[in-house]
Image (cartoon, grey):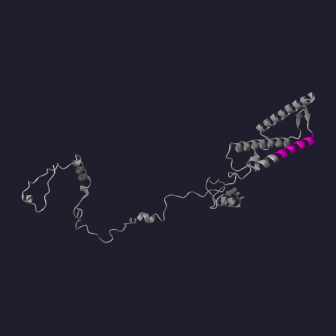
């Protein structure tokens, strides 16, 4: 329902309006309030005081006397004075010259022996930091301890096995080549022929390399891309052939 508002000089403002009393809801009170109040009384309220603390007032008879806080020494008795001059426990007799000295007691003679003995050699150490951190040289890994091993200098077993396999494969290849030569199916290239073939392979590689260097940097078409790949494959094959001819001095080719 909307309230009609009249101007201040309106006649309707003289009519007495009824007062509308709004009833407020009851104030919210937590159900844990008694527990909180009890806890506060048991902890904080118990330690709260008003004014100086109530302590026991000292009696007038117990006033502070002179020298009452100084430490009290024990009184010297007659027995303690006499104990300086008399001893009830007798000292042990002086040992004879033939008696062995007890173990663990250092005498003057033992000190002379240790002083004249050969000094111990210091253990070699290694300083590995600028702040002086050091460690034993034997454990630092700088000493060649491996040369003292039992099998030092011997060829490992896996290398011996690999060498044996290579030797066997070379023997089988030599036997195969010998059989083919006996049958007349293979021909041995001389050094001049092998060198001529090697020179021809290198010239072909130079031609392909010169053509490869002249290619465009941008391969924007499929033909350029395929042409570049064909040149790379051909150059790689020539490099393998050149390496093969330079590695093996003896070359056999079929008679066909």
**Image-quadrant location for residue 15:** bottom left
Which quadrant, please, contains the C terminus?
Answer: top right
Q: Which residue appears at 22% of the width and 51% of the height?
A: 37
Q: Position of residue 242 (x, y in %)?
A: 83, 43
Left or right, 114 with respect to 25, comes to: right
Res. 151 in view? no
Q: Position of residue 121 (x, y in %)?
A: 71, 57
Predominant secondary structure in magenta? helix
Left or right, 165 with respect to 24, comes to: right
> In the image shown, does 62 or 126 lie closer to the viewer?
126
Please determine whether, in this image, residue 78 is positioned above or below residue 38. Answer: below
Q: Position of residue 210 (x, y in %)?
A: 79, 49
* Numbered-mark total: 0
- Residue 200 colored in magenta in the image: yes
Q: Which residue appears at 26% of the width and 69% of the height?
A: 63
> In the image shown, does 161 or 244 lie closer to the viewer?
244
Res. 223 in view? yes
- Residue 230 colored in magenta in the image: no
> In the image shown, does 50 or 212 lie closer to the viewer?
212
Left or right, 113 with respect to 152, comes to: left
Q: Which residues are magenta?
A: 190-205
> In the image shown, does 176 or 216 lie closer to the viewer?
216
Q: Which residue appears at 68% of the width and 42% of the height?
A: 222
Q: Position of residue 24 (x, y in %)?
A: 16, 50
């Amino acid at each position: 329902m909307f309230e009609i508002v009249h101007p201040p000089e309106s006649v309707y403002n003289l009519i007495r309006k009824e007062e509308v009393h709004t009833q407020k809801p009851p104030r919210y009170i937590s159900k844990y309030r008694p527990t909180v109040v009890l806890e506060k009384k048991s902890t904080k309220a118990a330690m709260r005081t008003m004014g100086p603390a109530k302590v026991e007032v000292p009696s007038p008879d117990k006033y502070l006397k002179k020298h009452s806080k100084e430490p009290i020494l024990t009184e010297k008795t007659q027995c303690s004075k006499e104990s300086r001059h008399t001893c009830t426990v007798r000292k042990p007799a002086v040992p004879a010259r033939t008696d062995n000295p007890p173990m663990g007691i250092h005498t003057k003679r033992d000190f002379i022996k240790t002083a004249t003995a050969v000094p111990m050699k210091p253990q070699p150490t290694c300083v590995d930091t600028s702040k002086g951190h050091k460690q034993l040289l034997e454990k630092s890994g700088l000493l060649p301890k491996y040369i003292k091993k039992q099998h030092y200098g011997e060829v490992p077993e896996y290398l011996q096995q690999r060498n044996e396999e290579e030797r066997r494969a070379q023997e089988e290849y030599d036997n195969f080549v010998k059989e083919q030569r006996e049958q007349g199916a293979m021909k041995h290239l001389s050094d001049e022929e092998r060198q001529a073939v090697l020179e021809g392979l290198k010239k072909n590689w130079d031609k392909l390399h010169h053509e490869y260097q002249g290619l465009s940097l941008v391969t924007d078409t499929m033909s350029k891309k395929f042409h570049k790949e064909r040149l790379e494959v051909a150059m790689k094959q020539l490099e393998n052939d050149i390496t093969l001819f330079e590695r093996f001095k003896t070359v056999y080719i079929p008679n066909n």
